[in-house]
Image: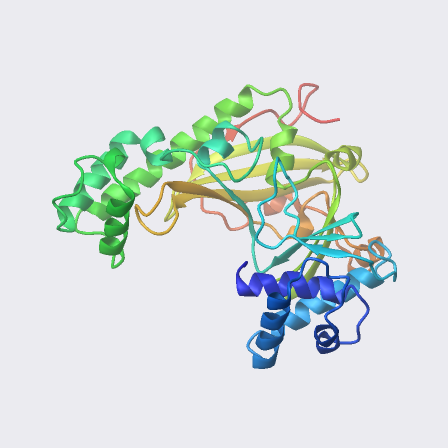
Amino acid sequence: MANLRTTITELVTGLGMLGHHSVDAALDERPPQMVSVSPEVWDQLAAVRAGGAYDEEFGAAFDNGAAFLASAGGLRGRPPLTVEWKGSQRAPGDEVAPVDLRIDHVYLVSCKYLSKILFNASPAHLFDGLLSGPHGRRSGDWYAEVAPDAYEDLYRRVRDGVGLPDLPPDAGSLRTEDRRRLRVALAPGWPDGAGAAYLELTRAVSAASAARWLGALAARDDREAMFWRLLRMGGAPYFVLGRVAGRPLRLRIATPWDWRIRFRLEDLVVEPQPGGQPRVGWQARVRDKDTGRRLSVVGHIEVRWSHGRFGSPPEAKVYLDVPHEAVPGYFPLDAESAAAGGAEPGGSDQDDGHGAPAGPEPLRLFGSAGPSATGH
Protein backbone atom coordinates (compact mmCIF):
# COMPACT_ATOMS: atom_id res chain seq x y z
CA MET A 1 0.00 0.00 0.00
CA ALA A 2 1.17 3.53 -0.68
CA ASN A 3 2.39 5.87 2.08
CA LEU A 4 -0.50 6.64 4.46
CA ARG A 5 -0.56 10.41 3.90
CA THR A 6 -0.40 9.84 0.14
CA THR A 7 -3.23 7.32 0.31
CA ILE A 8 -5.40 9.77 2.24
CA THR A 9 -4.81 12.75 -0.05
CA GLU A 10 -5.31 10.78 -3.26
CA LEU A 11 -8.43 8.85 -2.26
CA VAL A 12 -10.12 11.72 -0.45
CA THR A 13 -9.50 14.00 -3.44
CA GLY A 14 -11.48 11.46 -5.45
CA LEU A 15 -14.18 11.25 -2.78
CA GLY A 16 -14.62 15.00 -2.88
CA MET A 17 -15.66 14.78 -6.54
CA LEU A 18 -18.73 12.65 -5.79
CA GLY A 19 -20.96 15.36 -4.30
CA HIS A 20 -21.16 14.29 -0.66
CA HIS A 21 -21.64 17.08 1.88
CA SER A 22 -18.72 15.97 4.07
CA VAL A 23 -15.74 13.64 4.31
CA ASP A 24 -17.47 11.54 6.93
CA ALA A 25 -20.60 11.10 4.84
CA ALA A 26 -18.49 9.89 1.92
CA LEU A 27 -16.50 7.48 4.11
CA ASP A 28 -19.67 6.09 5.68
CA GLU A 29 -21.17 5.37 2.26
CA ARG A 30 -18.02 3.86 0.71
CA PRO A 31 -19.33 4.91 -2.72
CA PRO A 32 -19.14 2.25 -5.44
CA GLN A 33 -17.84 4.83 -7.90
CA MET A 34 -14.45 4.42 -6.16
CA VAL A 35 -13.85 1.25 -8.11
CA SER A 36 -10.23 0.57 -7.13
CA VAL A 37 -10.58 0.71 -3.34
CA SER A 38 -10.52 -2.55 -1.40
CA PRO A 39 -12.46 -3.14 1.84
CA GLU A 40 -9.13 -3.17 3.70
CA VAL A 41 -8.25 0.31 2.43
CA TRP A 42 -11.71 1.60 3.33
CA ASP A 43 -11.25 0.20 6.84
CA GLN A 44 -7.87 1.87 7.18
CA LEU A 45 -9.22 5.23 5.98
CA ALA A 46 -12.08 5.05 8.46
CA ALA A 47 -9.72 4.19 11.32
CA VAL A 48 -7.32 7.01 10.48
CA ARG A 49 -10.19 9.47 10.16
CA ALA A 50 -11.51 8.46 13.57
CA GLY A 51 -8.07 8.98 15.09
CA GLY A 52 -7.99 12.63 14.00
CA ALA A 53 -4.25 12.80 13.26
CA TYR A 54 -4.74 13.68 9.58
CA ASP A 55 -7.74 15.99 9.74
CA GLU A 56 -5.95 18.71 7.78
CA GLU A 57 -5.09 16.31 4.95
CA PHE A 58 -8.65 14.95 4.83
CA GLY A 59 -10.08 18.47 4.68
CA ALA A 60 -7.70 19.85 2.04
CA ALA A 61 -8.10 16.83 -0.23
CA PHE A 62 -11.90 16.77 0.04
CA ASP A 63 -12.07 20.51 -0.74
CA ASN A 64 -9.92 20.01 -3.84
CA GLY A 65 -12.15 17.23 -5.10
CA ALA A 66 -15.26 19.32 -4.49
CA ALA A 67 -13.67 22.26 -6.32
CA PHE A 68 -12.92 20.01 -9.31
CA LEU A 69 -16.52 18.79 -9.32
CA ALA A 70 -17.85 22.37 -9.36
CA SER A 71 -15.27 23.80 -11.75
CA ALA A 72 -16.19 24.88 -15.27
CA GLY A 73 -12.73 23.65 -16.24
CA GLY A 74 -13.32 20.29 -14.54
CA LEU A 75 -16.45 18.20 -14.04
CA ARG A 76 -18.91 21.14 -14.37
CA GLY A 77 -21.08 19.89 -11.54
CA ARG A 78 -21.51 16.35 -12.93
CA PRO A 79 -20.45 13.69 -10.38
CA PRO A 80 -18.39 10.99 -12.08
CA LEU A 81 -19.50 7.40 -12.62
CA THR A 82 -16.04 5.98 -11.92
CA VAL A 83 -12.99 7.13 -9.99
CA GLU A 84 -9.98 4.86 -10.52
CA TRP A 85 -7.04 5.04 -8.12
CA LYS A 86 -3.59 3.95 -9.27
CA GLY A 87 -2.23 3.51 -5.75
CA SER A 88 1.27 2.05 -5.56
CA GLN A 89 1.13 0.44 -9.01
CA ARG A 90 3.91 1.45 -11.36
CA ALA A 91 2.54 2.54 -14.71
CA PRO A 92 3.70 0.41 -17.65
CA GLY A 93 5.44 2.10 -20.55
CA ASP A 94 6.53 5.72 -20.87
CA GLU A 95 4.08 7.70 -18.74
CA VAL A 96 4.90 11.41 -18.63
CA ALA A 97 2.04 12.55 -16.41
CA PRO A 98 2.26 11.49 -12.74
CA VAL A 99 -1.37 10.32 -12.72
CA ASP A 100 -2.94 9.20 -9.43
CA LEU A 101 -6.65 9.24 -10.35
CA ARG A 102 -8.56 8.63 -13.57
CA ILE A 103 -12.08 10.02 -13.67
CA ASP A 104 -14.68 8.48 -16.02
CA HIS A 105 -11.80 7.07 -18.12
CA VAL A 106 -11.10 10.63 -19.35
CA TYR A 107 -9.90 13.10 -16.71
CA LEU A 108 -6.38 12.44 -15.44
CA VAL A 109 -5.51 13.88 -12.02
CA SER A 110 -2.21 14.15 -10.18
CA CYS A 111 -2.44 14.77 -6.43
CA LYS A 112 0.46 16.88 -5.20
CA TYR A 113 0.57 17.85 -1.57
CA LEU A 114 3.48 19.78 0.00
CA SER A 115 6.08 18.79 -2.59
CA LYS A 116 8.23 20.73 -5.06
CA ILE A 117 9.86 17.56 -6.42
CA LEU A 118 8.84 16.99 -10.01
CA PHE A 119 10.15 13.42 -10.07
CA ASN A 120 13.02 11.06 -9.27
CA ALA A 121 15.11 9.41 -11.96
CA SER A 122 18.47 7.77 -12.38
CA PRO A 123 21.16 10.35 -13.24
CA ALA A 124 21.98 8.54 -16.49
CA HIS A 125 18.31 8.54 -17.51
CA LEU A 126 18.17 12.30 -16.92
CA PHE A 127 21.54 13.64 -18.05
CA ASP A 128 22.28 11.16 -20.86
CA GLY A 129 18.82 9.86 -21.80
CA LEU A 130 17.00 13.20 -21.39
CA LEU A 131 14.15 11.48 -19.54
CA SER A 132 13.06 9.63 -22.65
CA GLY A 133 11.37 6.36 -21.74
CA PRO A 134 10.08 4.97 -18.43
CA HIS A 135 11.08 7.06 -15.39
CA GLY A 136 11.60 4.06 -13.15
CA ARG A 137 14.73 2.81 -14.88
CA ARG A 138 17.90 2.75 -12.78
CA SER A 139 21.52 2.44 -13.83
CA GLY A 140 24.92 2.02 -12.18
CA ASP A 141 26.80 4.24 -9.75
CA TRP A 142 26.80 7.76 -11.22
CA TYR A 143 29.47 9.03 -8.83
CA ALA A 144 31.87 6.31 -9.96
CA GLU A 145 31.08 7.02 -13.60
CA VAL A 146 31.52 10.80 -13.72
CA ALA A 147 33.96 11.49 -10.85
CA PRO A 148 35.87 8.24 -10.22
CA ASP A 149 38.97 9.76 -8.62
CA ALA A 150 37.07 11.96 -6.17
CA TYR A 151 34.72 9.09 -5.36
CA GLU A 152 37.49 6.62 -4.62
CA ASP A 153 39.37 9.19 -2.55
CA LEU A 154 36.26 9.74 -0.41
CA TYR A 155 35.70 6.00 -0.06
CA ARG A 156 39.27 5.34 1.08
CA ARG A 157 39.03 8.07 3.72
CA VAL A 158 35.71 6.73 4.92
CA ARG A 159 36.85 3.10 5.02
CA ASP A 160 39.93 4.04 7.04
CA GLY A 161 37.99 6.38 9.33
CA VAL A 162 35.02 4.23 10.40
CA GLY A 163 36.98 1.19 11.59
CA LEU A 164 35.72 -1.35 9.04
CA PRO A 165 38.98 -2.76 7.64
CA ASP A 166 37.26 -5.74 6.02
CA LEU A 167 35.42 -3.55 3.51
CA PRO A 168 36.46 -3.98 -0.15
CA PRO A 169 39.52 -1.98 -1.28
CA ASP A 170 37.47 0.07 -3.79
CA ALA A 171 33.94 1.47 -3.88
CA GLY A 172 33.06 -0.42 -7.05
CA SER A 173 33.29 -3.71 -5.17
CA LEU A 174 30.81 -2.76 -2.45
CA ARG A 175 28.05 -5.32 -1.91
CA THR A 176 24.60 -4.62 -0.51
CA GLU A 177 25.65 -5.67 2.99
CA ASP A 178 28.80 -3.53 2.79
CA ARG A 179 26.67 -0.52 1.87
CA ARG A 180 24.34 -1.18 4.78
CA ARG A 181 27.25 -1.31 7.24
CA LEU A 182 28.73 1.88 5.83
CA ARG A 183 25.40 3.69 6.00
CA VAL A 184 25.02 2.78 9.68
CA ALA A 185 28.62 3.75 10.49
CA LEU A 186 28.25 7.12 8.76
CA ALA A 187 24.90 8.04 10.31
CA PRO A 188 26.58 10.27 12.97
CA GLY A 189 28.59 12.14 10.31
CA TRP A 190 31.75 12.01 8.24
CA PRO A 191 34.97 10.83 9.93
CA ASP A 192 37.98 13.17 10.14
CA GLY A 193 39.23 14.20 6.71
CA ALA A 194 36.24 12.81 4.81
CA GLY A 195 34.14 15.98 4.91
CA ALA A 196 36.55 17.88 2.66
CA ALA A 197 36.74 14.89 0.31
CA TYR A 198 32.96 14.84 0.07
CA LEU A 199 32.87 18.54 -0.84
CA GLU A 200 35.35 17.84 -3.61
CA LEU A 201 33.14 14.99 -4.82
CA THR A 202 30.09 17.27 -4.91
CA ARG A 203 31.98 19.82 -7.01
CA ALA A 204 33.25 17.17 -9.42
CA VAL A 205 29.87 15.45 -9.82
CA SER A 206 28.03 18.76 -10.28
CA ALA A 207 30.39 19.92 -13.02
CA ALA A 208 30.51 16.56 -14.80
CA SER A 209 26.73 16.09 -14.66
CA ALA A 210 26.11 19.55 -16.14
CA ALA A 211 28.62 18.84 -18.90
CA ARG A 212 27.04 15.45 -19.71
CA TRP A 213 23.59 17.02 -19.84
CA LEU A 214 24.82 19.79 -22.10
CA GLY A 215 26.47 17.27 -24.42
CA ALA A 216 23.30 15.21 -24.71
CA LEU A 217 21.17 18.28 -25.38
CA ALA A 218 23.57 19.57 -28.01
CA ALA A 219 22.95 16.40 -30.03
CA ARG A 220 19.17 16.91 -30.20
CA ASP A 221 17.34 19.09 -32.71
CA ASP A 222 14.42 19.84 -30.45
CA ARG A 223 15.56 20.92 -26.99
CA GLU A 224 12.04 21.97 -26.15
CA ALA A 225 11.33 18.30 -25.47
CA MET A 226 13.68 18.38 -22.49
CA PHE A 227 11.86 21.37 -21.04
CA TRP A 228 8.51 19.67 -21.52
CA ARG A 229 9.74 16.49 -19.85
CA LEU A 230 11.20 18.41 -16.91
CA LEU A 231 7.79 20.01 -16.37
CA ARG A 232 5.99 16.71 -17.07
CA MET A 233 4.01 17.93 -20.05
CA GLY A 234 2.89 15.08 -22.29
CA GLY A 235 0.53 14.11 -25.06
CA ALA A 236 -2.63 14.48 -22.97
CA PRO A 237 -3.66 17.33 -20.66
CA TYR A 238 -4.11 16.51 -16.99
CA PHE A 239 -4.93 18.27 -13.74
CA VAL A 240 -2.92 18.83 -10.57
CA LEU A 241 -4.90 19.07 -7.34
CA GLY A 242 -2.97 19.59 -4.14
CA ARG A 243 -1.70 22.03 -1.57
CA VAL A 244 1.55 23.99 -1.26
CA ALA A 245 2.63 26.68 1.20
CA GLY A 246 -0.73 26.59 2.96
CA ARG A 247 -2.83 27.27 -0.13
CA PRO A 248 -4.77 25.07 -2.59
CA LEU A 249 -3.06 24.08 -5.82
CA ARG A 250 -5.48 23.53 -8.71
CA LEU A 251 -3.98 23.51 -12.19
CA ARG A 252 -4.48 22.25 -15.72
CA ILE A 253 -1.21 21.08 -17.29
CA ALA A 254 -0.88 21.89 -20.99
CA THR A 255 0.31 19.56 -23.71
CA PRO A 256 3.31 20.52 -25.87
CA TRP A 257 0.82 21.35 -28.62
CA ASP A 258 -0.99 23.79 -26.32
CA TRP A 259 2.29 25.17 -25.07
CA ARG A 260 3.66 26.03 -28.53
CA ILE A 261 0.50 27.94 -29.40
CA ARG A 262 1.01 30.29 -26.46
CA PHE A 263 4.75 30.27 -25.67
CA ARG A 264 8.22 30.13 -27.19
CA LEU A 265 11.35 28.79 -25.53
CA GLU A 266 14.10 31.34 -26.09
CA ASP A 267 16.94 30.09 -23.91
CA LEU A 268 17.85 27.19 -21.67
CA VAL A 269 20.69 27.46 -19.17
CA VAL A 270 22.42 24.64 -17.29
CA GLU A 271 24.90 25.32 -14.49
CA PRO A 272 26.68 23.34 -11.79
CA GLN A 273 25.77 24.81 -8.41
CA PRO A 274 27.34 24.55 -4.95
CA GLY A 275 25.41 22.86 -2.19
CA GLY A 276 25.35 20.05 0.33
CA GLN A 277 24.67 17.56 -2.48
CA PRO A 278 25.92 17.47 -6.06
CA ARG A 279 23.62 19.97 -7.71
CA VAL A 280 22.85 21.17 -11.23
CA GLY A 281 20.66 24.22 -11.81
CA TRP A 282 18.44 24.76 -14.84
CA GLN A 283 16.64 27.82 -16.08
CA ALA A 284 14.27 28.22 -19.02
CA ARG A 285 13.58 31.63 -20.49
CA VAL A 286 10.24 31.77 -22.23
CA ARG A 287 8.33 34.38 -24.21
CA ASP A 288 4.56 34.67 -23.96
CA LYS A 289 3.40 35.16 -27.55
CA ASP A 290 0.16 36.78 -26.48
CA THR A 291 1.71 39.51 -24.34
CA GLY A 292 5.34 39.62 -25.46
CA ARG A 293 6.34 39.20 -21.80
CA ARG A 294 9.51 37.26 -21.04
CA LEU A 295 9.13 34.65 -18.31
CA SER A 296 11.54 32.51 -16.34
CA VAL A 297 11.25 28.97 -14.96
CA VAL A 298 13.97 27.97 -12.50
CA GLY A 299 14.75 24.60 -10.96
CA HIS A 300 17.57 22.37 -9.86
CA ILE A 301 18.58 18.73 -9.68
CA GLU A 302 20.19 17.07 -6.69
CA VAL A 303 22.22 13.92 -7.33
CA ARG A 304 22.38 12.07 -4.04
CA TRP A 305 22.54 8.68 -2.47
CA SER A 306 19.23 7.04 -1.77
CA HIS A 307 18.87 5.46 1.69
CA GLY A 308 21.79 7.29 3.30
CA ARG A 309 25.50 7.78 2.60
CA PHE A 310 26.76 4.97 0.36
CA GLY A 311 23.42 3.26 1.01
CA SER A 312 22.46 2.80 -2.67
CA PRO A 313 23.65 4.21 -5.99
CA PRO A 314 22.75 7.88 -6.45
CA GLU A 315 19.44 9.10 -7.81
CA ALA A 316 18.52 12.43 -9.38
CA LYS A 317 15.73 14.48 -7.79
CA VAL A 318 14.30 17.24 -9.99
CA TYR A 319 13.03 20.28 -8.09
CA LEU A 320 10.94 23.25 -9.21
CA ASP A 321 12.20 26.47 -7.59
CA VAL A 322 9.34 28.75 -8.61
CA PRO A 323 5.67 28.50 -7.61
CA HIS A 324 3.76 25.98 -9.71
CA GLU A 325 1.35 28.72 -10.72
CA ALA A 326 4.27 30.67 -12.24
CA VAL A 327 5.14 27.98 -14.81
CA PRO A 328 4.11 28.80 -18.39
CA GLY A 329 1.70 26.03 -19.36
CA TYR A 330 0.50 25.37 -15.80
CA PHE A 331 -2.88 27.10 -16.05
CA PRO A 332 -5.31 27.76 -13.19
CA LEU A 333 -8.15 25.24 -13.16
CA ASP A 334 -10.56 27.98 -14.25
CA ALA A 335 -9.60 30.95 -16.38
CA GLU A 336 -11.95 32.98 -14.21
CA SER A 337 -9.79 32.17 -11.19
CA ALA A 338 -6.72 33.49 -12.96
CA ALA A 339 -8.45 36.71 -13.93
CA ALA A 340 -9.76 37.26 -10.42
CA GLY A 341 -6.38 36.68 -8.84
CA GLY A 342 -4.41 38.64 -11.40
CA ALA A 343 -2.03 35.70 -11.82
CA GLU A 344 0.09 35.36 -14.92
CA PRO A 345 2.30 32.40 -15.76
CA GLY A 346 6.02 32.72 -15.21
CA GLY A 347 8.32 34.95 -13.19
CA SER A 348 9.88 38.02 -14.73
CA ASP A 349 13.53 38.07 -15.76
CA GLN A 350 14.18 40.37 -12.80
CA ASP A 351 13.31 37.41 -10.56
CA ASP A 352 15.78 34.98 -12.19
CA GLY A 353 17.51 32.79 -9.65
CA HIS A 354 14.74 32.69 -7.03
CA GLY A 355 17.15 32.23 -4.19
CA ALA A 356 19.24 29.50 -5.84
CA PRO A 357 22.89 29.61 -4.80
CA ALA A 358 25.33 31.33 -7.10
CA GLY A 359 27.54 29.10 -9.22
CA PRO A 360 29.96 29.04 -12.14
CA GLU A 361 29.21 30.74 -15.44
CA PRO A 362 26.06 29.16 -16.90
CA LEU A 363 26.27 26.96 -19.99
CA ARG A 364 23.86 28.33 -22.60
CA LEU A 365 22.31 25.69 -24.79
CA PHE A 366 21.15 28.14 -27.40
CA GLY A 367 20.88 31.89 -27.80
CA SER A 368 18.04 34.07 -26.65
CA ALA A 369 17.46 35.72 -29.98
CA GLY A 370 17.72 35.12 -33.68
CA PRO A 371 16.18 32.66 -36.15
CA SER A 372 18.12 29.66 -34.80
CA ALA A 373 16.37 29.78 -31.41
CA THR A 374 14.12 26.81 -30.78
CA GLY A 375 10.44 27.61 -30.74
CA HIS A 376 7.57 28.48 -32.98
In the rendered image, which quarter is residue 230 located in? top right
In the rendered image, which quarter is residue 304 located in? top left
In the rendered image, which quarter is residue 333 located in? bottom right
In the rendered view of the protein, which quadrant contains the C terminus? top right
Q: Is residue 362 visible?
A: no
Q: In this view, does 182 lie to the left or right of 323?
A: left
Q: Residue at coordinates 38% horizontally, 33% vertically from top-left?
A: 140
Q: As displayed, is residue 372 above or below residue 4? A: above
Q: Residue at coordinates 70% horizontally, 63% vertically from top-left?
A: 13
Q: Where is residue 278 in the image (x, y as percent from the top left)?
A: 39, 41
Q: Is residue 94 left or right of residue 291?
A: left
Relative to the observer, which residue lies in front, 179 or 268? 179
Q: As displayed, is residue 81 above or below residue 276? A: below
Q: Position of residue 133 (x, y in %)?
A: 58, 32
Q: Can residue 374 be seen in this view?
A: yes
Q: Residue at coordinates 14% horizontally, 48% vertically from top-left?
A: 164
Relative to the observer, which residue lies in front, 166 or 158? 166
Q: Position of residue 136 (x, y in %)?
A: 52, 40
Q: As displayed, is residue 62 above or below residue 51? A: above
Q: In this view, does 199 lie to the left or right of 334?
A: left
Numbered-mark total? 0
Q: Where is residue 130 in the image (x, y as percent from the top left)?
A: 55, 30
In the rendered view of the protein, which quadrant contains the N terminus? bottom right
Q: In this view, does 183 lie to the left or right of 123?
A: left
How is this picture coloured? rainbow
